[in-house]
Image (cartoon, grey):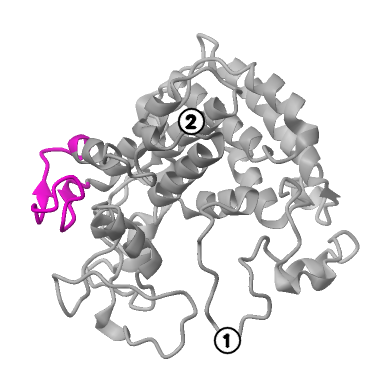
Amino acid sequence: MKAYEYQQLVDMFNNVPYTNALQGTSQILPTYDAAQDIYDSLVANIDIAVGLMAQPEAQAPATSDILFGGHAQLWIQFANTLKLRILMRQSQKADRASYIQTEIGTISGGYLEQDAAVNPGYVQTDGKMNPFYDFCFNATGTYTQDFWRANQYYINFDSANHDPRYRYVYGPTPSDATVYAGNFLGQSNNALVGSASSIFGPGVLKAFNQSAVILSAAESYFLQAEAGLRGWITTDIKAAYENGVTSSFEYLGAISAPIKSKVDPTVDSITFSSPDESAAYYYSQPGNKQTNFDAVTTTTDRLALIIRQKWAAMNNVTPFEAWADYRRLHLPADIPISQSPYVDVPTIPVSVVYPTVEYTTNATNVPTQGANAQHTDKIFWMP
């Protein structure tokens, strides 16, 4: 879990306090470590953790483990998947290729085949519900987040490719239960104001006591598919890709096909008995290069397909990963930037500025960012 958290810190800020951090009052002004050094340490510590969890005495009562219920093998799979994520983040750094392949070669024990989702026992009380649900609803069930609305780019992509997931990632507009509509980020004079645009949907807002996803099975499969495509692991790439899509459909509960089936244009809608059937219908669309693995043949196009579908699966579930993939690969290639006329730099931000409190309390150590007020300083693994 320390590796999980520190990877996100590096992926946001680049260099952060690490070696001297978490020392309490004995070290209140920690120095900053180089981001790549932190990454290497995280990989080494994950290896140590896997070795410890593989010991027979690595047992715990189910009630003491709010992530995996005391199953050590699931912790090993979680660690392996996290290690693969950390290594794949560095895929675009040519000088890291040998290191990446060597470290991937040491992974054993499998990868996650289920969501790593935590649940400490959420109750229907403000501040004690699932954090995302608590953000959107109060304890009486009143929806409170009218500011956050659907993204039309996602709706357009799903609709064009006969993907039902937008109906689960987003809900219908409050003013019309038959309409799904969104905005474009930063768009001024938007006609879809108020209740004319969609809110968060039933696939991501399930219940006050829904488990909180830490690392999804869908992400695990897509990581494996990409690693296999690069020749870094031995796996059935197509199966891993399709399992990633299926896992996303399963998490969202997506079973309804959208209007106008591409397979049979005379059919207005289809309802399947399970998300697995719906997913299979989706990724088997003949000739669709946005969904069907066999419809694309080059490594470049297959990578774009894998990352596109990974992006679709992460939306409103673990969107941080979609941001990381875009910064690493610039995929999906047509992701729109903000249309706001007040944007200083017309690009997607690639990093987060150090908080002001660091400059006021740890000024000797915090790195000087200069022009990074524009959020343009790259993370070490970016091309």
Contact between marks 1 and 2 (CB within 8 A): the answer is no
Q: Report whether 178 appears left or right of 80.
A: left
Q: Tell me which numbered mark, 1 or 2, is placed earlier along the sequence.
A: 2
Q: Amino acid at mark 1?
A: Pro
Kindly state the secondary structure of the residue where label 1 is placed.
Answer: loop
Binning the other alpha carbons within 10 Å of mark 2 as few (below 14), some (14 to 19) or many (20 upward) gives many
Image quadrant in which you'd find residue 375: bottom right
Main secondary structure found in the magenta portion: loop
Pick out the residue farthest to the right: 364
x then y, percent, for residue 140: 21, 69
Specify whether residue 180 is in view. yes
Q: What kind of residue is marked 2? A: Ala
- At numbered mark 2, what does the secondary structure look like: helix, strand or loop? helix
Q: Residue under circle 2?
A: 225
Using the rendered image of the protein, determine whether residue 79 is visible from the camera's viewpoint. Answer: no
> Splitting the image into 4 quarters, where does residue 337 fall?
bottom right
Q: Which residue is rendered at x = 60% and y = 53% of the image? A: 330
Q: Which mark is residue 168?
A: none
Looking at the image, the residue that sits furthest to the bottom is 189
Image: magenta residue range:
254-277
Q: Is residue 97 left or right of residue 191?
A: right
Q: Relative to 333, say whether 141 is above or below.
A: below
- Give neighbour class at mark 1: few <14, some 14-19, many 20+ (Cα, 10 Å): few
Residue 341, label in figure: 1
How far separated are the C-alphas under marks 1 and 2? 39 Å
Would you say residue 271 sits in the magenta stretch?
Answer: yes
* Number of marks present in the image shown: 2
- 143 in relation to 257, above or below: below
Across and down, in percent, residue 239 comes to 37, 26
* Relative depth, front residue between 318 and 24: 318
Question: Relative to residue 368, is residue 226 drawn left or right?
Answer: left
